Image (cartoon, coloured by chain):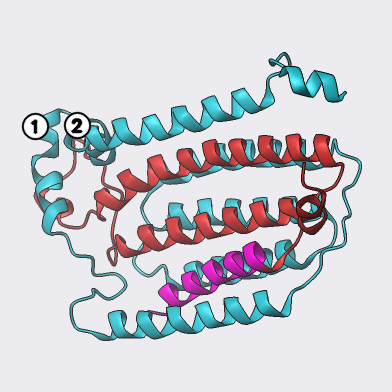
Chain colours: A cyan, B red
Amino acid sequence: MENIAPQLYTLLVFMVIGSIVAVETKNLLSAVISVSAVGFALSVAFLFMGAPDIAITQLVVEVLVLIILIRGTILLDNTAVETHRDTLAVVASLIFFGLLLGFGAMIFGSKGFPEFGEPLMRVSRVYVQTGLPATHAANIVTSVILDFRAYDTLGEVTVLFTSVIGALALLRKDGKVREEEVASV
Amino acid sequence: MTVYFMCAVLLMMGLYCLVAKKNIVKKIIGIVIMEYAVNLYLITIGYKKGGVAPIIEKTTSPELLERFVDPLPQALVLTSIVIGLGTLALMVSLVIRLYEKHGTFDMSQISKLRG
């Protein structure tokens, strides 16, 4: 696929529209479904950009995100809370947007940053050239994850483990009750 | 360049949702949208024009190796996506507990009740 720009822009416009719907709709269930539509479009965009591993992972994770978020919203009866707007918050996010555009123009305008479609491959060239002889993995992405940068992966797995332990500790049914809480009840 | 700008627009959409909305589930949705934007931006940086996926087959020639897209951002984003799922599960379990305690998703009411 030589020129992916039309497909990529179509998907990006779809993602922006989907996130606008997810942010602005009143019903929480439709907001959750819209954010999932954004995630599936993201998966297709990854597929166009030569990242099939990421696309598969994003697809699986997106289904799980949909299930978790629906568990968080639909079983609770109060699904249509009125959302209020704060003028201070709107002004703050507009200021952040301006700051981001300003610094982004400074960075992207300078000569050092690569254009879209011409990545810096200084480190990655070594991985691509020596990946198969050094690690015997045909997929360079997995050879980077599990061999060249295995310590990074170990740290990230630790973060994942900690968050899962936190979720389990929050959701367990039979917890200890402190004595003063028993007295107050 | 326009691709990077669209990623920034998506990021700001998530930030606006995170800051301006009072509903906790909407705040979680904002965080999820920001994660999507950052992952998309990192993969976009690694894309090479006319690039192919970095998977070596028997028929792969040395010229095709030069057309591979950058595998390093892909490897880092792969774990980042899964970590996003773990933190989302943590946030949703917090929201479920908050709802059981206070009976509402409204952030302003929850901070009013205090204990």
Evaluate if marks 1 and 2 touch, with contact meaning CB atoms under 8 Å apart. yes
Can residue A91 be seen at all in this image of the molecule? yes
Can residue A139 be seen at all in this image of the molecule? no
Q: Residues within 10 Å of mark 2 (few under 14, many from 20)?
A: some
User: In this picture, which residue range is highlighted in magenta?
Assistant: B1-19
In the visual, does A46 lie left or right of A108?
A: right
> Which amino acid is tagged 2?
Asp
Of tags 1 and 2, the one toward the viewer is 2
The x, y position of residue A147, in whole percent, is: 19, 31
Same chain check for tags 1 and 2: yes
Residue A134, numbered label:
1
The x, y position of residue A93, in whole percent, is: 58, 76
> Which amino acid is tagged 1?
Ala
Residue A147, numbered label:
2
In the visual, does A22 lie left or right of B45?
A: right
Q: Judge whether A108 appears above or below B55 on screen.
A: below
Query: Which image quadrant is residue A156 in?
Result: top left
Residue A148, numbered label:
none
Q: For the point 83% across and 20% down, which residue is it?
A: A183
